[in-house]
Image (cartoon, rainbow, N blue to C red):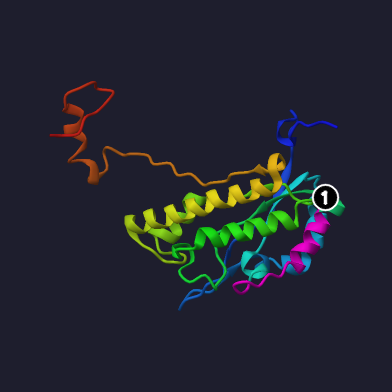
Amino acid sequence: MSTTPWYRDGRLHFGAGIENTFVPQERPGERAIDEYALTEHYDRWSEDLDLAVSVDAEFLRWGIPWHVVSPERGTWDWSWTDRVLDGFAERGIRPIVDLLHYGTPTWIEGEFAHPDYASFVAEYAVRAAERYRDLATDYTPVNEPMLHALFSGEYAYWPPYRRGQAGLVEISTAIARGFVETQRAVAEVLGERATFVHVDASMRYAGDVDAPEHRRTAPPTRRSRGSPRTPCSPT
């Protein structure tokens, strides 16, 4: 039996994914987001897996709804995820399991800003990895952590609705700590079998030296001392 990881076997692997954004908190004018509810995946999961098989997908990015499996602190209900992950195994599809896809359960007051957030998410990760150790070895600890931090920490789009640079630093730090503890937790359970698939969004910034807001700074920068290929700050 080969010991080469599937992602290093030299083959091109085709996969798919099921959108699984979960932000279960609400506030005036904003409803909760549960993509599985919106797409009827809770009811049609078997059909969705069959569709993945029909296009020859070898793997499927798919997330555990943390707010569903842990509706209250200390309460765990894996009944739905048990059925779905058994369905993955029956069809021979490799699950790449998203553990955190934007939202926390509603019982975590302050969400990522809660002082015990990292321990909460680590406990959840341990329980998931232990329960599905024979069904799943590939995990995404945090989906798009930078975008996550921006939306929750700088733009105030999502809980805990922090704003500005201070908010970004606070939430980035909290998410990073949870990220580390989550990956450690899964690795401790699965050992060398654990595989981590990291996913993040990126941004491209293109400067326009002729834009009105840059006209005062761009010319002095061009004339400043130093190499013309390495502009200096205007004095």
Q: Position of residue 41 (x, y in %)?
A: 72, 65
User: Secondary structure beneath disc 1?
Assistant: helix
Q: Position of residue 72 (x, y in %)?
A: 61, 74
Within 10 Å of disc 1 (Cα), the crowding (few <14, some 14-19, many 20+) is some
Q: Nearer the viewer, residue 133 or 200?
A: 133
Q: Nearer the viewer, residue 10 or 79?
A: 79
Tag 1: amino acid: Val
Q: Tell me: 91 left or right of 108.
A: right
Figure quadrant of the C terminus: top left
Q: Position of residue 70 (x, y in %)?
A: 64, 69
Residue at image location 59% in from the left, 48% down from the top: 183
Figure quadrant of the N terminus: top right
Whether residue 101 is visible here, answered yes or no, is: no
Q: Position of residue 10 (x, y in %)?
A: 74, 28
- Which residue bears the numbered disc 1? 53
Tell me how many marks there are: 1
Write the start and end of the magenta stretch as one range: 71-88
Q: Is residue 169 above or below residue 162?
A: above
Q: Quadrant of residue 65?
A: bottom right
Residue 85 is covered by the magenta coloring: yes
Whether residue 194 is visible here, answered yes or no, is: yes
Q: Is residue 85 above or below residue 111?
A: above
Residue 15 is covered by the magenta coloring: no
Residue at image location 58% in from the left, 52% down from the top: 182
Q: Is residue 185 above or below residue 117?
A: above
The outermost residue toward the left is 235
